[in-house]
Amino acid sequence: MRFAKDAGSTFNGVLCGRAIWADGVEVFIQEGEAAAIEWLRTQGKQNVDELNAMLAETATPVTV
């Protein structure tokens, strides 16, 4: 996103479900539901928070 912003691109958001949650699937398979829920509460949330921070720095707000 920084590269796109630095190159002069404008964007309002991103689609990135798999990039955010993919590692949680492996946790679910190997360790079960409780571990996956904990992963979502910790690492999954951190992934979303980091993405939101990146978007705040790089995305162009939508104006109506």
Image (spheres, helix red, strand yellow):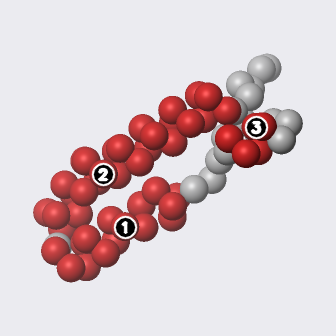
Is residue 25 left or right of 2 when viewed as pictured?
A: left
Q: What is the residue that sits farthest to the right in this orientation?
A: 8
The Cα atoms of the two marked residues, 3 and 1, are separated by: 27 Å
Type of the residue with mark 1: Asp
Residue 5's place in the image compared with 44, above or below, is above
The residue shown at (51%, 64%) is 18
Residue 60 lies, in percent from the top left, at 74, 28
The residue shown at (83%, 41%) is 7
The Cα atoms of the two marked residues, 2 and 1, are separated by: 9 Å
Do tag 2 and tag 1 residues touch (Cβ < 8 Å)? yes
The Cα atoms of the two marked residues, 2 and 3, are separated by: 26 Å
Residue 41 lies, in percent from the top left, at 25, 47
Residue 54 lies, in percent from the top left, at 56, 36
Is residue 7 left or right of 61 when viewed as pictured?
A: right
- Disc marking residue 43: 2
Query: Total label count?
Result: 3
Type of the residue with mark 2: Gln
- Disc marking residue 23: 1
- Disc marking residue 5: 3
